């Protein structure tokens, strides 16, 4: 096992990894930007190192500074968390070059599954269902038009090297496709340093269902079942739950097994998530593979009892996955609400500033993953998520009722948060019935 791990991230995921290290009796080294110098979790680390000013490109996205901090602290491994550099093969390669273990996939596995075009090739070879569309990155406009004519509109343009909605454009006709192709490529270049894009068939009404995977360095792969992440705004997840309601379990099992084969084929070690869209007939089509731990991993942890972060560290240290597929069972239902420092009543405008009121929920079946304490100042430099509220209960109905109660207890001020939106959603008749599609929330907000 590792002696010392550097956590190349910030906020709640940095604290989550720090706690996992403590339980494994591993020393933790946190890095921070000047914007995060007063973050309370830094006091819990065995060591904290400043890596630069507030802008992410000068701190959390600066590979050279992170490697320098790792060498100064004499760490055995680096955990990238999610976001920032977590899905960058060059960061994984830099760790390898410096004889530092990267807690995540190898550069080769990340390239095979993280690049969406290469990932689709691997998926097809493993029997994972994929959308019809371009086999490779689009070379020119006429090629895109030809493919769109063959598969039929609407189509969606996607960045080969990234996600989170950036570089994504839905096109319902040829004129829009020609216009948006250039725009999507420019967005992808700005966001990921890679302007390559591809196109595939777009489903107007679909659910977002993803499968949590673990692979190890001994060729083993297991699936920890699924999460439903269909409540989204602008391709950003708002609420996640597990298991997915109203889904054919046998069909899902077959998709899970194919996804596990794909992980094995890629020689993938670590946590990964295979994301799918499911149409009205219950057929699955793979979107992408996220080659990192997901924001919503606590949902799966609560229904399986498996600590995904600890397992990822153990796998990186060369251990086998400490359980077999037949040991993974679903227990009850879990729901996660992402609490963002945004004002839903003002077009989700970011709401940075000092938190003076911080009254958190508790009680049976309630978990709060956050780095915030009273007096914490939300910086304007980073993602607006300040907490993840997760509940667990025996049934979905009980979990929804528990979440509604927890949200009523949750008081934050004077900054604005998305708590009022979540209160509205967990009591919404359509959502409580289950099976809403990925555009439901945006339709609701426009109403």
Image: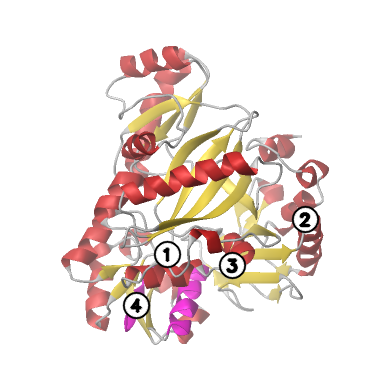
Identified at 52% across, 81% down, the residue is: 40
Distance from Cα at disc 1 to Cα at disc 4: 12 Å
Quarter of image, res 158: top left
The range drawn in magenta is: 2-24
Pick whichever of labels 2 and 3 is earlier in the sequence: 3
User: Which quadrant: the C terminus?
Assistant: top right
Residue 406, percent from left and from top: 77, 67
Q: How is the image coloured?
A: secondary structure
Earlier residue among tags 2 and 1 = 1
Q: Is residue 369 above or below residue 284?
A: below
Q: Which residue is mark 4?
A: 5
How far apart in space, not on screen, are marks 4 and 3 (Cα)?
31 Å
Residue plotted at (44% across, 20% down): 177
In the rendering, at what x and y percent does residue 417 appear? Answer: 67, 59
Taking the magenta stretch, the answer to whether it contains residue 13 is: yes
Circle number at residue 81: 1
Q: Is residue 274 above or below residue 78?
A: above
Disc 1 or 4, which lies upstream in sequence? 4
Q: Which mark identifies residue 73?
A: none
Residue at numbered disc 2: 423
Marks 4 and 3, the one that precedes in the sequence: 4
Which of 247/341 is in front? 247
Q: Where residue 246 sits: x, y (%)?
A: 71, 42
Q: Which residue is mark 3?
A: 353
Q: How many marks?
A: 4
């Amino acid at each position: 096992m590792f002696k010392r791990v550097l956590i190349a991230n910030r906020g709640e995921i940095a604290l989550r990894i720090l706690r996992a290290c403590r339980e494994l009796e591993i020393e933790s080294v946190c890095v921070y930007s000047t914007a995060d110098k007063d973050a309370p979790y830094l006091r819990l680390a065995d060591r904290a190192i400043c890596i630069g000013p507030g802008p992410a490109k000068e701190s959390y996205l600066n590979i050279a500074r992170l490697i320098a901090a790792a060498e100064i602290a004499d760490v055995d491994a680096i955990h990238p968390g999610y976001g920032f550099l977590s899905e960058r093969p060059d960061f994984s390669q830099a760790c390898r070059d410096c004889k530092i273990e990267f807690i995540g996939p190898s550069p080769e596995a990340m390239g095979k599954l993280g690049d969406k075009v290469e990932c689709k090739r691997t998926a097809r070879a493993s029997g994972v269902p994929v959308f019809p569309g371009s086999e490779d990155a689009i070379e020119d406009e006429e090629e895109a038009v030809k493919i769109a004519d063959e598969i039929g509109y609407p189509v969606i343009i996607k960045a080969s090297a990234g996600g989170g909605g950036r570089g994504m454009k839905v096109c319902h006709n040829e004129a829009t496709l020609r216009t948006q192709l250039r725009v999507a490529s420019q967005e992808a270049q700005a966001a990921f340093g890679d302007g390559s894009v591809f196109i595939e068939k777009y489903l107007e009404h679909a659910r977002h269902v993803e499968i949590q995977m673990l692979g190890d360095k001994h060729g083993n792969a297991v699936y920890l079942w699924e999460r439903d992440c269909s409540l989204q705004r602008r391709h950003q997840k708002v609420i996640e739950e597990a298991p997915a309601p109203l889904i054919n379990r046998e069909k899902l099992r077959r998709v899970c097994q194919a996804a596990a084969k794909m992980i094995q084929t890629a020689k993938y070690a670590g946590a990964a998530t295979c994301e799918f869209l499911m149409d009205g007939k219950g057929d699955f089509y793979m979107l992408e593979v996220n080659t990192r731990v997901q924001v919503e991993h606590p949902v799966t942890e609560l229904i399986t009892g498996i600590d995904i972060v600890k397992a990822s560290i153990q796998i990186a240290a060369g251990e086998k996955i400490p359980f077999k597929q037949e040991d993974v069972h679903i227990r009850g239902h879990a729901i996660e609400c992402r609490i963002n420092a945004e004002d839903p009543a003002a077009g989700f405008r970011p709401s940075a500033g000092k938190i003076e009121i911080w009254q958190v929920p508790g009680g049976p079946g309630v978990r709060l993953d956050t780095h915030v304490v009273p007096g914490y100042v939300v910086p304007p430099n980073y993602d607006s998520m300040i907490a993840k509220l997760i509940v667990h209960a025996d049934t979905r109905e009980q979990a929804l009722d528990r979440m509604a109660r927890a949200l009523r207890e949750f008081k934050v001020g004077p900054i604005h948060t998305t708590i009022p939106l979540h209160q509205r959603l967990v009591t919404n008749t359509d959502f409580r019935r289950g099976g809403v599609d990925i555009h439901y929330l945006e339709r609701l907000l426009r109403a």
